[in-house]
Amino acid sequence: MPLRLNKEISEDEFYGQFSNVKASHQTLLCFSLKEDDKTLWKLWGHAYNNPGQCHAEILVLREMEEYLVANIPNTTKYSITWFLSYSPCRWCCDEITNFLMKSQTKIEFNIKAARPYYFDDDENQKGLKMLRRLGVLIKMMEYSDYEECLYLFVDPCTKFIAWPDLEVQSIANKMIFHHLLAQDDNRLDNHLFTTDDSSPVHAGSTSDFESHVLINKFPPEDPNKTPDKKDEFSDIRTPQKTCFPQRTREFGKEVKRKLF
DNA sequence: ATTTTCAAT
């Protein structure tokens, strides 16, 4: 069964599928849906793509749609959160768009993706931009997102152990993601990489990260490994577990930075 | 190109 309702994933699945430094030919999607001002999820679970059949997103969208048509909302807004091991492809973006357009109830949609899925494909970029224009909060996963995903979908008592280069790769993913999605946004011309949260990335390392990602999307072994740089980022997050669910600031907000 | 990029060798 590619889709499982009310089932956590194992620790092995979590680390195996959501690693941002190892490529995979599978996609895992952990999802939750809740009615706002309620704490408990109304619908949750996880799904793998069905090989040769359909992407994980489609399975989950079907399940959520089924729920929405069968249940009269006791709220004015749904909140949906997805943890995806790959960012959605162009067609899945279209399907998410259709899903949002069909809903009678406002939907707050959060997508956190571990790895970029063919970001160099224009159509994939367009799909992601469309989602963002529709108000979907979409970002690449970073340390705190991994903590949250583990807490919510694996085990709240297990401590997240970061793998080597998680920080470096997530920062690289974040930068390339912003760069690509900002292409058609004139307001951001000179501020592609500004952030709200005092990002530890130094200006000098920008091109390193960018080329690193553009040349090798998911390098299994980083030939340019620089231990110095890794150490530089190793302490930027507190590893201790915090109370989830807890919303970190989303990237979508940071585009409203001052321009002067 | 409703798609050779979420496998099959």
Image (spheres, coloured by chain):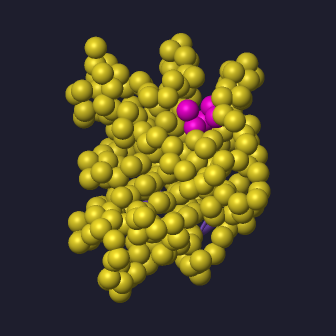
Q: Find the magenta span and give its range.
A: A167-171
Q: Residue at x 76, y 51 (%)?
A: A159
Whether residue A54 is visible, yes or no, is no
A67 is higher (above) or lower (below) than A140:
below
Q: Residue at x 60, y 54 (%)?
A: A244
Residue A12: x percent and y percent?
75, 61
Q: Which chain is yellow?
A: A
Residue A209: x percent and y percent?
55, 26
A90 is higher (above) or lower (below) than A250:
below
Q: Residue at x 28, y 64 (%)?
A: A106
For the C terminus of chain A, the quadrant is top left
Residue A49: x percent and y percent?
53, 69
Please check the rendered image and state whether residue A112 is part of the magenta-colored stretch, yes or no: no
Q: Residue at x 63, y 75 (%)?
A: A7
Q: Residue furthest front?
A: A37
In front of the other: A55 or A137: A137
Helix, strand or loop: magenta stretch: helix
Whether residue A109 is visible, yes or no, is yes
